[in-house]
Image (cartoon, rainbow, N blue to C red):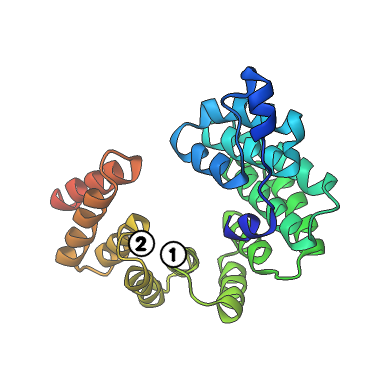
Amino acid sequence: MSRLRELFIPTSCAGLIALLPMLATAFESYDSCVAAVATDPATTIDAADKWARFDGGWPAKHCRALALIAAGAEMQGARELAGIAADAKELPPQVRSEMFAHAGDVFLQLDQVPEAKQSLDRALNLATDPAPALTLRAAIKAAEGDHRGAITDLSEVMEASGPAAGLLILRSEARHATGDLVGARDDANRAIGQSPENADAWYRSGQIEAELGNKPGARDAWLKTIDLARGTPLAQQAQINLQRMDLGQ
């Protein structure tokens, strides 16, 4: 997202808002639109649509797609993202590549693997920095059971761009799936070291420690998960895991 914020020049709608009361909820910049996605995605869809129809351009359409995804219309949002990436040929190739990669990630989460692969191919063809596309390729490989291939792609990304917490968590999952519990634990611990407030990293640590027989370590990790992700499905699953461990299951 930060790369898009740097490349999209904010578009002012101040004059239009003054002339057209119907645009009172439209946005004056890409940043303000994206900020609204996090707090009220449903309202942002309509406001971004108005902004797009009154000279908001690709930034407004991209913000609308993000709002659709955040509001639960993931398939529609992903298809709009892919459409923008295909049509907005005036945008830098890397920006379009990252849009395709984002769309592909959403498709993959929806188990739409053919569409995810199509987005991946287009992301790789456009990429000047292949890290986002390779991350998507790793996720697709993992979903199809090629965990060693996923590890290779994720390692390549981290060699080029650094071991971000999200990448370490993904590689920890892949290493876990291959039976490399020591490597998986190392990646989970590195992710925690980089991002101590990352609930996913703590949850992953708990799973690995439990399999290694370190019940106190697993308990601490899952309690931390519950604390950080309170009220979410991840916290609920951590609670279930604790109960099962206590029952010896």
92 horizontally vs 145: left or right: right
Identify which residue is drawn at 26% across, 49% down. Answer: 238
Residue 160 or 220: which is nearer the viewer? 160
Identify which residue is drawn at 58% across, 24% down. Answer: 24
64 horizontally vs 39: left or right: right
Where in the figure is residue 41, as x and y percent of width and height? Answer: 51, 32
Badge number at residue 201: 2
User: Which of the two labelled residues, at mark 2 and mark 1, occupies the earlier sequence position?
Assistant: 1
Residues under numbered marks 2 and 1 in contact, where contact means CB atoms less than 8 Å apart: yes
Where in the figure is residue 5, as x and y percent of width and height? Answer: 61, 55
| Residue 76 visible from this viewpoint | no
Q: Is residue 83 above or below residue 193?
A: above
Residue 214 or 162: which is nearer the viewer? 162
Identify which residue is drawn at 32% across, 40% down. Answer: 232
Where in the figure is residue 107, as x and y percent of width and height? Answer: 64, 43
Amino acid type assigned to the residue bearing label 2 in the image: Ala
Amino acid type assigned to the residue bearing label 1 in the image: Ile
Q: Is residue 236 above or below residue 207?
A: above
Q: How many marks?
A: 2
Q: In what quadrant of the picture does the N terminus appear?
A: bottom right
Provide the secondary structure element on which disc 2 rests: helix
Q: Residue furthest top?
A: 22
Badge number at residue 169: 1
Residue 24 or 199: which is nearer the viewer? 24
176 horizontally vs 61: left or right: left
Alpha-carbon neighbours of circle 2 within 10 Å: few (<14), some, or many (≥20)? many
Provide the secondary structure element on which disc 1 rests: helix
Badge number at residue 207: none
| Residue 2 visible from this viewpoint | yes
Structural distance between the alpha carbons of marks 2 and 1: 6 Å
138 horizontally vs 189: left or right: right
